[in-house]
Image (cartoon, rainbow, N blue to C red):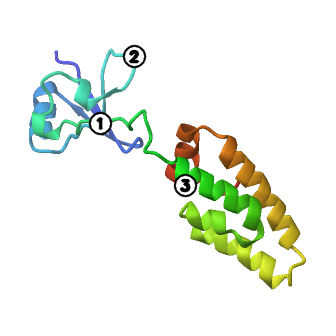
């Protein structure tokens, strides 16, 4: 007697049991996808449908993974230096955040400095000095990853 197959979709909806022929028919009709999990009586765990040989047509196989990010980032030394120096000199105005493409954070620093009539400007300036020093001391690759790609907003 053929072992029965069960299909688990979205991690919680279970279908089956199906014999192997039914399962292949469902897969051919597009009712079983590569994200579905399968379990067969007598096996210890669920497996991805894509890992069952000959089950899914090639057109339903997952797309190739995206190419890896280049190991060498683009030249960011000018941006790093500009953001670092502007953070040190004009930290309370948030200019360095605008240079990094984070206008919301820059505007926050500017508004905190202005709307408190300058009372909180020294705090914003200290944050700017610290961030400027951090920018200037990071490697170009680390700076690129943290502040250009990941858009890390603070420190």
Mark 3, other Cα within 10 Å: few <14 / some 14–19 / many ≥20: some
Instruction: Give the Cα distance between marks 3 and 2.
Output: 54 Å
Mark 2, other Cα within 10 Å: few <14 / some 14–19 / many ≥20: few
- In the image, residue 57 above or below residue 149: above
- Number of labelled discs? 3
Residue in the foreground of this view, choosing between 68 and 54: 68
Nearest to viewer (mark 1 / mark 3): 3
Picture quarter with the N terminus = top left
Mark 1, other Cα within 10 Å: few <14 / some 14–19 / many ≥20: few
Find residue 106 and report its horizontal and vertical position in percent: 65, 69
Q: Which mark is residue 13?
A: none
Q: Secondary structure at mark 2?
A: loop
The reply, left or right, for residue 80 in relation to residue 86 is left
Q: Secondary structure at mark 1?
A: loop
Q: Secondary structure at mark 3?
A: helix
Nearest to viewer (mark 3 / mark 2): 3
Q: Which residue is mark 3?
A: 79
Asked if disc 1 and disc 3 are in contact, CB closer than 8 Å, the reply is: no
- In the image, residue 105 above or below residue 79: below
Which residue appears at 30% of the width and 39% of the height? Answer: 66
Which residue appears at 18% of the width and 44% of the height? Answer: 31
- In the image, residue 106 above or below residue 144: below
Find residue 27 and report its horizontal and vertical position in percent: 14, 37
Asked if disc 2 and disc 1 are in contact, CB closer than 8 Å, the reply is: no
Q: Which residue is mark 1?
A: 65
Q: Which residue is mark 2?
A: 44
Which residue appears at 67% of the width and 54% of the height? Answer: 84
Nearest to viewer (mark 2 / mark 1): 1
Which residue appears at 64% of the width and 63% of the height? Answer: 96
Q: Earlier in the sequence, mark 3 or mark 2?
A: 2
């Amino acid at each position: 007697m053929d072992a029965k197959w069960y299909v688990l979709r979205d991690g919680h909806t279970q279908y089956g049991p199906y014999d192997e022929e039914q399962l292949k028919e469902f897969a051919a009709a597009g009712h079983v996808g590569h994200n579905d999990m399968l379990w067969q009586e007598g096996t210890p765990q669920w497996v991805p449908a894509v890992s069952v040989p000959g089950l899914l047509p090639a057109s339903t196989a997952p797309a190739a993974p995206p190419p890896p990010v280049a190991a060498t980032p683009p030249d960011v030394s000018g941006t790093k230096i500009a953001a670092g120096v502007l953070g040190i000199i004009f930290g309370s105005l948030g200019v360095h955040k605008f240079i990094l493409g984070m206008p919301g954070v820059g505007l926050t620093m500017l508004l905190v400095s202005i709307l408190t009539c300058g009372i909180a400007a020294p705090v914003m300036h200290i944050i700017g000095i610290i961030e400027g020093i951090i920018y200037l001391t990071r490697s170009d690759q680390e700076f690129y990853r943290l502040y250009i790609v990941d858009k890390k907003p603070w420190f």
